[in-house]
Image (cartoon, grey):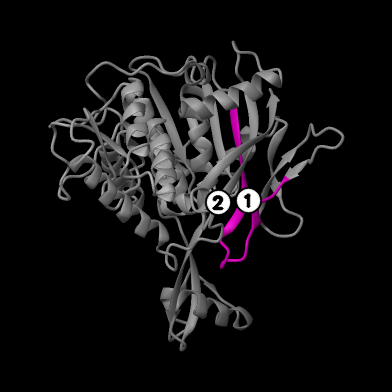
Amino acid sequence: MSLVQDPQADDARRALERVIGSRTLERSTRLQEFLRFVGDLSLRGEGERINESLIAIEVFHRENHSPADDSAVRRQAHALREKLQRYYADEGQSDPIRLELPVGRYVLSFRHADAPSATPATAPTDASGGRRRLVMGTALGAAFGLGALAGARLGRSSRPTGPQPALSPAVSELWSGWLRPGAEIVMCLSNPPTSVYKVFDDPGSPDTKGGYRVPEGEVAGVRTLLKLREKGSVFAFPDPANQAKQGEAAAAVRLAVFLSRAGVEPVLRQSRNMTTEDFQREDVVLFGHDGNNAWVSELLATYPLRFSQSEHSARRRISDRRAGPGEPDVFENEFAPPQEGLGEGFALISKLPGLGEGRRLLLVSGLTSSATDLATSYLIDPARAGQLLEVAHAAGVSPGRPHFQAVLRVRAQHSVPMRGDILRVRSV
C-alpha cells in the first residue's frame, strides 16, 4: 500500500467533502467542523500548524484552552476516528481515497483505498515531509544540544532524488535568485546569552572563580525558580553553550526541508561563529532578534525597521523610523496572565541585499522564538507568501527587486503561534 504523496487536489477535496456530507456525520455538526478544519489545513500543506490548542480555539471557541486541564479536543478526535472507521465500513467502502486521522496527531492523511494504514510502529509520513522533518529535527537538536558542530550541512542527506515540485509564483518571487541548483544557503541561528547556576558550601572555593555570586536580596527568588537547595551560596557562570531557541530551531528545520527540495544545500551555523566575511561571500538567512543574535543590530542599522529596548523593561521591541502621522512607531509584545495563555507578539521580516556583490540577506526576527517560527511560514507557504507579496506590492515594492521589511503580529496560545497578520511593509 502506498501513501498518496501528492493526491490531485480535486480528488482529495472530493474525498473530504464526501465524508463531511455523509450519513455517518450528518448529525455530528461539531465533528464535521473538526474534520473540515484539519482537512483544509492539511490540503494546503499547513499540517505543521495543527495542534490541540489551535483546534480548541478555532473549532470549539475555547479561548482559554489549556491542554493539561481540558481534554475536549482529544475526546472529539477519538470520536472522529471512530466515525471514519464506521464510514469506511459502510457507505464509504468504494471510496478510492480514504481519510485517516493518525493517533497522536491532528494532520489528516489521504490514502489509497487498497493500501493498509500506517501502524503505530511506523513513523507517520505526510505530503509535507513529516518523516524528513523528524529526522532533520533530531539532527539539528543534537548539533546544538551537544555543541559539537560549528556548522552542519543538512541538505544532501535529505534532498529528494525525484523531480522537484514547482513553486508557487509568490514563493518563486520571494526566493528569486536564491534557489540556484547546487547553491548553498547559510542558515544562521542565534545563540542567546545563558548562565549556569551552581551552589557551593564554601563561597571561597577555587571552583567559584569566574562566577558571579547572587546577592542575598535576590538569591531566594533564584532558589525558588530553579529549585536549588536552601543551604550554600549561589553563583552564576556565563555559559557559551552552542544552543538555539526552540522556535528558531523549528523554523530552521522547515526552511532546510524547503531549500533541500528546491535543490539547494542548507548549511547551518551559529551566530557566534559567523564573521563579516561569511556575510560578504554567502547568501544568508539569519534567525532571531538583536538580543540573542548580535549581528541583527549591525545589519539593520541603516534600515527603517529595527530593534530597540522597551521603555518599561529590558525586553526588545520593533521600532519604525519612517512611521507617519497616526502610525504606531513601536511594536511591543503583550503577554497575558499565565493562566490565560493568550498573547500578542511581533516579528520582523527583512529581505535585503547582501553585504557582498551579488549576495542576498534575509532576517526572520521574532520578538519571541515562536513568532520567528510563524514568520518563516510567510516565506515558504504559498498562501501566506501570496498575502505578504500582495501587501508588499501595494507598498511600492517592485516585483523585480523584492527588497522590503515587514512587521507581522503573531497571536499565540501558551507560546504556540496560532495566526499572523501583516501590519506594515516598508520598501528598502
In the picture, measured across the screen, residue 380 lies left or right of residue 331, that is left
Q: Amino acid at mark 1?
A: Glu
Q: Earlier in the sequence, mark 1 or mark 2?
A: 1
- Residue drawn at x 67%, y 58% is 314
Look at mark 1 in the image and give the residue it sits on.
344
Highlighted range, magenta: 331-351
Q: Residues within 10 Å of mark 1 (few under 14, many from 20)?
A: some
Magenta highlight: main SS: strand
Q: Is residue 311 magenta?
A: no
Question: In front: 37, or 103?
Answer: 37
In the rendered view of the protein, which quadrant contains the N terminus? Answer: top left
Location of residue 357 (image quadrant): top right
In the rendered view of the protein, which quadrant contains the C terminus? Answer: top right
Look at mark 2 in the image and give the residue it sits on.
412
Q: Is residue 37 visible?
A: yes
| Mark 1 → mark 2, Cα distance in angstroms | 6 Å
In the picture, measured across the screen, residue 73 lies left or right of residue 298, that is left
